[in-house]
Amino acid sequence: MPETFDLQRTLKAVLGGQKDAFLAVVRVYGPSLRTFLGTQLFHLDELDDMAQEVFIAAYHSLPNFKRTEDFGAWLRGIARHKLLNYYQRTARRRQTLELFRKDASVIVESDLEEAAARTTETHLQVLLGCINKLPDRMRKVVRGWLDGEKAAALVDELKLSLANIYQIQHRASQALRECLKKELAHAE
Amino acid sequence: MQNDLQDALIAWQDGDLPRERTEELLTRLREDAVFRSAFAEEIWMLSQARVAQAANPRWLDLCEELEIAPKSESDGQERLERGVMAEVNKAAPQPVRQMDWRRVALGTMALSAALALFITLKPEPPPRQDARPAQPAVAVVLESTAQWGAQQKQRPVKGDALSPSRLHLGGGHLTLMFMSGVLLQMEGPADIELLTVDHVICHQGKTRAQVPKGAEGFRIETPHGTVTDLGTQMGVNVAEDGKTRMAVFEGSAEATLQQPGQDAVRTLVVKATQAIEMLSNTGEILTSDSENFLPALTPQIEPLQLAADYAQAVHSAKPRHYWRLDHQLDNSIPNEVSGSPPTLLLVGGAKLTADAAGHVSGQFGGASSKSGLTAVEPWLMQRSGSAVELWFASTSSDQVTLAGFSSALDNAKHVCLLEYSSVLLNNSRIGRVTGPRRVRYLMRWPGDSKSGVNLLSAPDITLYQWHHLVAQQKERQMELYLDGRLIGRGMADEMPQEFAAAMTFGYAIIDGPAPTRLPTAPSRHLSGRIAEIAIYDHMLTVEQIREHAKLGGKKL
């Protein structure tokens, strides 16, 4: 967490009527919340709409937040509730594999919590640099993630088999993890 | 990658898997903690990479809920947040740890001790209320007549610094100066991604890159191949259907094309006046014509916007010498300080000319014109305090001397140098410490060309823009200010009470190469402009420096 950000003081300012101070909360907790939502929502528009809904709900529920709680975990709790509603709203359209995502996300909940607690905007900035350093083909696959492209859509573009695309995706993921670890250690 | 992990990721991304298989995977996720952890790491990285690459949301609904105005400019959010946090933290601002090049460089500086060179780097800036690490800027908008596409959320204007981002031009032109010194023109309709200072992706549109010496390796990637500069001016056109043509106007470039169905790539070095077309479906690179590429653009230095009372402010600070460079008598520039010689002489191709707004300043033509300014009499530099103040704008990223102070006009025994884009160290372990976009303030005693104490700015100076510079010392303490902000402080060598300094501006006398260091000759000529040179026998106060910078249009 950035050292200059004082959550308690900021929340006090917000509750004292300084509404715009809440933007500082959004800035600090936005990256990990959006990443958390991104594990379950593939379209950026949906992801950002829901992140916004979560922050608005959090803003209104701020008097209920216990100061001893982990604010990030509290936000993700709101997010889980919203995701559940989302799944219920879209139940008719749900396919088997979407159900897999819903069920799996419940199973890996505590693992994702750990990852979320480590994620800051610094991580994302460093990661962006790491993505730019990837070899061209690997970077194209990672770019595909941003555009919500399924691996199958990259088959034609890269003239590779689907299995190869998933292999490259996995290698890119490993390379990014290593780069992130190295860069963050270096920066500290 | 193990099959289960791959299949779980396929299922996660809505890939094609039978229901029985997804049930198996869910069971393993429930029962195998190691597998579960590996899977969570993968999907977290996948999501993190998407969020890292995506633009920040504008939070319009949230702003409405908070009853505050949403951001409208590229830096609006940051400015807003900074203002908010400034208020929130007013009671007790706390220091922030800065994790940037200065800290890294500081650690490596010890390695250079053997070079008998001590470098004092930029100190910690004042506590920042905005703790968000600054998104590194890769380019600055030099010119814009862009008509932005509907999908362009943030619409940069002239002077804006751009971080890695995607630009959608519906029409018009946009000219960017990359921090490496690369000039990139683009014409809409265009869809271009800025990735780093030396790498862009052109999905569509016409581009032209002018790559200066030292910035070779600039890459323009297209859907049908990549073009890498080898020191050149080149144009790359990507049509709506992805058809990609490239032409080299000066120097050479390398075209790289992935061979279909292979890991191999085809490469071709393209020379000046040649043009090619890249065919990704066949992997061929064919000769093409050089028509319909963007013509070269020569950017202009923006006008210097000095307030009417700027000169009065300088006079109030009691300079020893002050040359406004806005008028001349024969070949010399009179000293504005009454009864105070020396005058400055225009040397070589140096001349005073008006900019687009009519403001007259010194114009210097670089190495080819051998231009500069020389003071006919020395300045008695005082150990008890001195300051050099000037405005400059450079049109090249070559190393230049803005001001040189030596024991005589014809030797290279400088005691003080103010330089831009200096090459100070080029050590393979610590990299090139200086280079394009940095200002260097050197103090040394005795005057020679080997050692000294340096203050270096961050590499964030942009070409074609005016910068305000103050370098000052008192006893051994030295300070460097750029655009009204303190860059750093250092402890210089012991120097005598007084030193008769021969002054040059816009160039320096430099020794030849080792071992003889002959011939000694004028060198490091500025290509650009200098204005409002003031020399003081005392240090300026922070308030005076900030006021002068503000009167020249710097926002502080």
Image: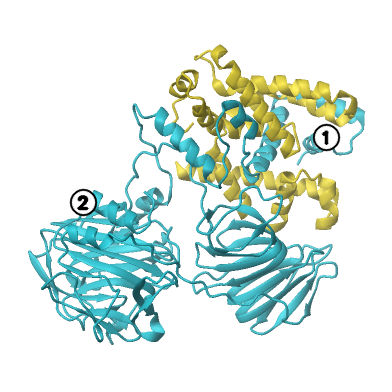
Chain colours: A yellow, B cyan
User: How far apart in space, not on screen, are marks 2 and 1 (Cα)?
Assistant: 66 Å
Q: Image height check: is B356 above or below B168?
A: below
Q: Residue B245: x percent and y percent?
A: 74, 73
- Position of residue B256 in the picture relative to residue A23 (left or right): right
SS class of the residue under badge 2? loop
Disc assigned to residue B144: none
The three-letter code of the residue at mark 2 reads Thr
- Position of residue A111 in the picture relative to residue A21 (left or right): right
Q: Mark 1 lies on which chain?
A: B
Dividing the picture into quadrants, the one containing residue B256 is: bottom right
Disc 1 target residue:
B11
Label 2–label 1 contact, CB within 8 A: no
SS class of the residue under badge 1? helix
Q: Mark 2 lies on which chain?
A: B
Discs 2, 1: same chain: yes
Dividing the picture into quadrants, the one containing residue A4 is: top left
The three-letter code of the residue at mark 1 reads Ala
Q: Residue B165: x percent and y percent?
A: 62, 52
Query: Could you tell me which residue is drawn at 68 percent across and 42 percent down?
Result: B50
Pair 2/1: label in front: 2
- Position of residue B216 in the picture relative to residue B168 (left or right): left
Along the line of sight, the residue nearer the viewer: A155 or A177: A155
Disc 2 target residue:
B541
